[in-house]
Structures are given as structure tokens and as C-alpha cells.
Amino acid sequence: MPIQNPALLADLEALGARHDADTVDHAERLLNITRDTGEFLSVLVRAAGATRILEIGTSNAYSTIWLAEAAKVNGGRVTTVERLPAKAALARGTLSRAVGIAPVTLEVGDGGEFLAHSVNASWDLIFLDSNRTQYAAWWPDIRRTLAPGGLLVVDNATSHPDEVAPLVAAIAEASEFTTVLVPIGKGEFLAHKGV
């Protein structure tokens, strides 16, 4: 199925590249995923039949569009969490321009706090693209809130392996998870929770 928002995605790719090249402060950069990562996420969501998707790290909603287009096929919805109000405002603008996507709920706040307040087994797929140094601390809530048969996807697993390593080590000790590192984009670490 062709993507529903090709012009919007192309605009966001160009904007992200220009913005990040001109922005010194790392926190203010958009840091979008790569296009091939977006395509990969779309395939994962569709193949998993995921309907309850959580994204932590919205930025300008480039990745959210990929997730929400795929979730629409499954009759699902996306909840995305962005810590910075300015980026959340950009995301709202992006989402208002998108067509043919699943419903998206945008939450402004801390990803760890959001996970802590999520009920058990509430997510079919969790995509982490946020503050990597916090992931290991979030792990107990990620493990608890990911549904059996669910999938955790962690971006930047090869571009920032040292920052992702504590989470990877914690997951390695969880016998119900099967993992793989996929060398696409900036590296995607996948952890599937057994049924």
C-alpha cells in the first residue's frame, strides 16, 4: 500500500535536515528518524497487527506519521509523548496536515512518567526515540506495559550504542524476550515479548 502523505513526509525530511544543520543546541534539533527507518516501522506495525502503539519522542511527528499510517490499516491508534512543548506544537501542526492516518493522541510530558502511569499490557508496540540515558530506568515499566506478543523498538542502537547498552543488558536478562539488532537507519534494536 503506498504511503498516504508522500509530500508531507518529503517536506518534513527537508525541514529536518535544514533545521538540524542550522541548530547548535542538541535539545532543539528535530533529530528525525531516517526514511528507511520509517518504512521499517510501517512494515513492523502492519506485520505485528499492532493496534495500541506508544511512541516516546515525538519531535515534529515525522515518525508519528509513519506509525499512524500503518496503524490505520490495523484499525489502531497511536499515543505519542513529547517532553518539550515547542516540539509538541510542531507535531500538532504536522498532524493537522496528515491525511489517512489512525487517531493520534499527543501527550506533553516525561516519557518515564507516562509509562509509570500506563496500565499493565496496554501497548502492542512501543517505539523509543527519546532520552536514551533514561531507557534502563524505564525498563520495569516498559516490560510491564508491553502486552504479551508485543514489540519494543529502540532507535539509535548503532549510532549511540553506549547509551542504549544498559537497556539492552536489562532485556537480555528477561527470558520472555527475543531480540535482534537491525542495521537500518541509525540502528533499530527490537525486543519481542513472548506470549
Image: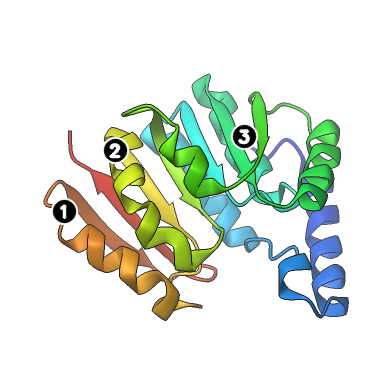
Amino acid residing under circle 1: Ala
In front: label 3 or label 1: 1
Q: Which residue is mark 3?
A: 68
Question: Which image quarter: residue 98?
Answer: top right
Element on which disc 3 rests: helix
Amino acid residing under circle 3: Ala
In front: label 3 or label 2: 2
Q: Which residue is mark 1?
A: 174
Question: Which image quarter: residue 72?
Answer: top right
Residue 109: x, y in percent? 63, 43
Q: Is residue 90 above or below residue 184?
A: above
Q: CA distance from mark 3 to mark 1?
A: 29 Å
Q: Is residue 90 left or right of residue 153?
A: right
Crowding around mark 3 (Cα neighbors within 10 Å: few <14, some 14 to 19, many 20+) is: many
Residue 62: x, y in percent? 71, 50
Q: Which residue is mark 2?
A: 144
Quarter of the picture containing the N terminus is top right
Taking depth in this image into account, of 163 and 156 the one nearest to the observer is: 163
Crowding around mark 1 (Cα neighbors within 10 Å: few <14, some 14 to 19, many 20+) is: few
Taking depth in this image into account, of 3 and 58 the one nearest to the observer is: 58
Q: Earlier in the sequence, mark 3 or mark 2?
A: 3
Q: CA distance from mark 2 to mark 1?
A: 12 Å
Task: Identify the residue at horizontal 15%, vertical 60% (top origin).
Answer: 173
